[in-house]
Image (spheres, grey):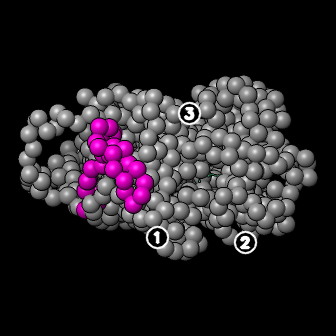
């Protein structure tokens, strides 16, 4: 095998705020397929993944759970590593941002930028989204909320260190201009160019209001704010700067594979930091689309709200790793968003895997067993195709041409098209069986040489398929090779270019590669699993237990208004009470509610609420409360929970 050089691919380092979901799995599965593909082609591959463990959100979650942030992340990260192990993700290194090797090198990165004069101390004022750990400018907010996750933001002001991002705007535009391949697909490049042209603000890179982070080396009051910490993982994992062997070997990375929402950080902030540190830039950033569930991005916070998020572990348990990987890689077009539904997945598994691939293998193995004692026959001149159409030549042409076509699609990250190229061969081979009708040939002794050639050609086609699918489904590839008697040979990409490799291998029928699924039954069972996970019940119409009925006249007396919570704090004298300042149209008033055990004050700020505005004011432990904020009980994951009755209307509008 020729030495092709190195290939360095990374996934984002995921937040270990909770278990990962199908969206993270999607990105990691793509990176894994690419890493396996490149290895098979002879590249020396470095495949990096990991976890991004610092930040305020993790600190808050740990506090809520009553553990240290380190204990909190250790537990979640163990689960993440388990998931990747179950899925046989072939990463070469897993970097955790809490590891010493990362911490000290991030501090060195900070010092490099500082010594360059690109870091200064200033004061940050902006809108902060705690879940996303992002500051936003007024102009970036969407309807006053975080443009990424849509949740409320809070005004925040603090002393902070800044990175002179604005200084690099022209260099970044030049980078896209001179090296368009740096950011793919093109649509993302255009977005980023527009973003830079609007004017780049310097980047806040430290925080002093929480301490779960890497200390700023020149100021112990500050910790390094998340993106400088996180992005640097791509070189700290390689040992930069103190242990440069791997760094010299693999950097610059060939590709950072990331979701579209963090393309901005990877194609603006990261190259600017590297420019400032006088380090080479990654060759490429590739932004993939989102998996959507019911039209919305699959996300951890949605999971927390009890939506039907698909857990990869459940799917793997039922259908196997390769089925899930195949589905994710085949169904979605790289760069675009795609809907995730159980039904689409089950149909894919049945049509492509059970019917097309599974049938091809089982029919061929059965026929070789039945018509040739279980041995792959030799090709002979006497068995050549003699009809008007040379089916053998057609099959061979598609089979030996497939590897290049798959390679070309992979170079463009078009995983679905690469698999489609393989399935063109799978379907052609199935058609070949129908065209050549081995069962008819078997009836005529004189046709034995022809039958042998047909069986040989089918075995060759399957052998090539087993090589081509290896990067995407290595377990299935191995199972097929075992059935075809190819257990003795390592999978090698070059072997996909020849059609005369097999002779005398003993085939052996095994279990169905992919059993056919009863889609209706599976859908029902998946639904029940989802309902169970949510604490639901099969019976969906049990009357709720309620207070006594009221008359319409009673209800009519209520004047309901929409308000926005401007501030929230704990009642100084009562643990159960929160004191809110609520703006309703022209008026801002104080309302005290007994919900302290359900909400943290900072979670409430910015929240739109419905207020009973004409409720007689009263004093609660010494503080006046004018009106009542509406809350309602909900049941999520089998647990009762209090939620805001919320609204998208503007403040002060009557609720109708
Ligand atoms: O952003 N569909 O971590 P994160 C497809 N720590 N992909 C999805 C997805 C979805 N619905 N949801 C998540 C972070 N992803 C930072 C990264 S890198 C230096 C720091 C995938 O846990 C997608 O690849 O929020 C996305 O970019 C990534 O998970 C975000 O993971």
Q: Quadrant of the N terminus?
A: bottom right
**Residue drawn at 27 percent across, 62 percent down:** 639
Magenta residues (range): 610-638
* Nearer-N-terminus badge (2/3): 2
Residue situated in front as seen by the camera: 534 or 177 = 534
Picture coordinates of residue 353 (x, y %)?
32, 49
In the image, residue 185 lies at what x, y percent?
A: 60, 32
Instruction: Tell me which residue sits at (82%, 41%) in the image.
Output: 164
- Give above or below for 158 relative to 391: below
CB-based contact (under 8 Å), mark 3 and mark 1: no
Q: Marks 1/2: CA distance?
A: 25 Å
Q: Is ligand 1 within 8 Å of the beta carbon of the residue shown at mark 2?
A: no
> With respect to residue 389, does 508 lie above or below?
below
Q: Which mark is residue 581?
A: none
**Distance from the alpha carbon under mark 3 to that under mark 1:** 31 Å
Image point 47% across, 44% down: which residue? Answer: 581
Q: Is residue 614 magenta?
A: yes
Q: Which residue is mark 1?
A: 65
Which residue occupies the foreground of this view, 237 or 517? 237
Q: Secondary structure at mark 2?
A: helix
Image coordinates for residue 644, horizontal then vertical, percent? 34, 47
- In the rendered structure, find residue 141 and report the number of the disc placed on it: 3
Label 1 secondary element:
helix
Quick check: 334 left or right of 222? left
- The image quadrant of residue 431 is top left
- Give the mark, 1 or 2, whose residue is nearer the N terminus: 1
Residue 609 image point, x, y percent: 37, 41
């Amino acid at each position: 095998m020729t030495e092709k050089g190195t290939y360095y691919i990374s996934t984002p380092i995921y937040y270990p705020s909770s278990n990962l979901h199908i969206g993270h799995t999607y990105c990691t599965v793509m990176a894994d397929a690419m890493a396996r593909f490149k290895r098979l082609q002879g590249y020396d591959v470095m495949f990096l993944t990991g976890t991004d463990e610092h930040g305020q959100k993790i600190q808050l979650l740990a506090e809520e759970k009553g553990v240290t942030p380190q204990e909190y992340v250790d537990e979640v990260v163990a689960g993440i590593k388990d998931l990747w192990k179950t899925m046989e993700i072939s990463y070469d290194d897993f970097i955790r941002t809490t590891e010493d090797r990362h911490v000290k090198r991030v501090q060195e990165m900070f010092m490099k930028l500082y010594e360059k004069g690109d870091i200064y101390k200033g004061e940050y004022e902006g809108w902060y989204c705690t879940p996303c750990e992002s500051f936003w400018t007024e102009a970036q907010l969407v309807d006053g909320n975080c443009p990424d996750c849509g949740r409320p933001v809070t005004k925040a002001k603090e002393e902070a260190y800044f990175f002179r991002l604005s200084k690099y705007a022209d260099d970044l535009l030049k980078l896209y201009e001179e090296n368009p391949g740096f950011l793919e697909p093109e649509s993302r490049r255009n977005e980023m160019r527009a973003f830079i042209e609007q004017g780049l603000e310097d980047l806040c890179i430290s925080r002093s209001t929480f301490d779960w982070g890497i200390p700023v080396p020149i100021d112990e009051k500050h910790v390094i704010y998340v993106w400088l910490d996180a992005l640097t993982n791509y070189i700290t994992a390689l040992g930069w700067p103190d242990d440069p062997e791997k760094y010299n070997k693999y950097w610059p990375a060939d590709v950072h594979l990331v979701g579209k929402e963090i393309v901005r950080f990877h194609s603006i902030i990261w190259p600017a930091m590297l420019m400032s540190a006088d380090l080479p830039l990654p060759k490429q950033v590739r932004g993939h689309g989102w998996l959507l569930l019911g039209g919305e991005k699959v996300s951890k916070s949605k999971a927390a709200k009890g939506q039907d998020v698909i857990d990869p572990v459940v799917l793997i348990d039922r259908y196997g790793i390769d089925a899930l990987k195949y589905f994710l890689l085949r169904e979605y077009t790289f760069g675009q968003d795609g809907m995730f539904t159980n039904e689409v997945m089950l149909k894919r598994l049945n049509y492509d895997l059970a019917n097309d691939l599974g049938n091809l293998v089982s029919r061929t193995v059965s026929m070789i067993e039945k018509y040739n004692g279980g041995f792959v026959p030799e090709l002979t001149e006497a068995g050549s195709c003699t009809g008007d159409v040379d089916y053998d030549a057609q099959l061979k042409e598609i089979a030996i041409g497939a590897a290049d076509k798959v390679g070309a699609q992979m170079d463009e990250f078009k995983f679905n098209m690469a698999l489609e190229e393989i399935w063109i061969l799978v379907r052609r081979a199935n058609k070949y069986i129908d065209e050549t009708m081995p069962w008819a040939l078997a009836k005529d002794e004189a046709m034995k040489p022809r039958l042998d050639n047909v069986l040989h050609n089918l075995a060759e086609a399957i052998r090539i398929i087993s090589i081509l699918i290896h990067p995407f489904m290595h377990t299935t590839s191995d199972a097929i090779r075992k059935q075809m008697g190819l257990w003795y040979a390592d999978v090698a990409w070059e072997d996909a270019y020849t059609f005369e490799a097999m002779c005398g291998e003993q085939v052996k029928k095994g279990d169905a590669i992919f059993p056919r699924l009863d889609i209706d039954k599976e859908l029902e069972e998946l639904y029940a699993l989802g309902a169970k996970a949510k604490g639901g019940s099969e019976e969906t119409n049990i009357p709720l237990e309620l207070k006594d009925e009221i008359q319409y006249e009673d209800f009519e007396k209520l004047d309901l208004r929409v308000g926005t919570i401007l501030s929230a704090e704990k009642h100084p004298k009562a643990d159960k009470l929160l004191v809110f300042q609520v703006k309703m149209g022209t008026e801002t008033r104080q309302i005290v509610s007994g919900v302290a055990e359900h909400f943290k004050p900072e979670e409430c700020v910015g929240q739109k609420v419905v207020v009973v505005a004409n409720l007689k004011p009263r004093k609660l432990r010494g503080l006046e409360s004018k009106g009542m904020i509406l809350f309602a009980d909900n049941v999520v994951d089998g647990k009762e929970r209090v939620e805001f009755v919320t609204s998208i209307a503007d403040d002060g509008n009557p609720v109708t």
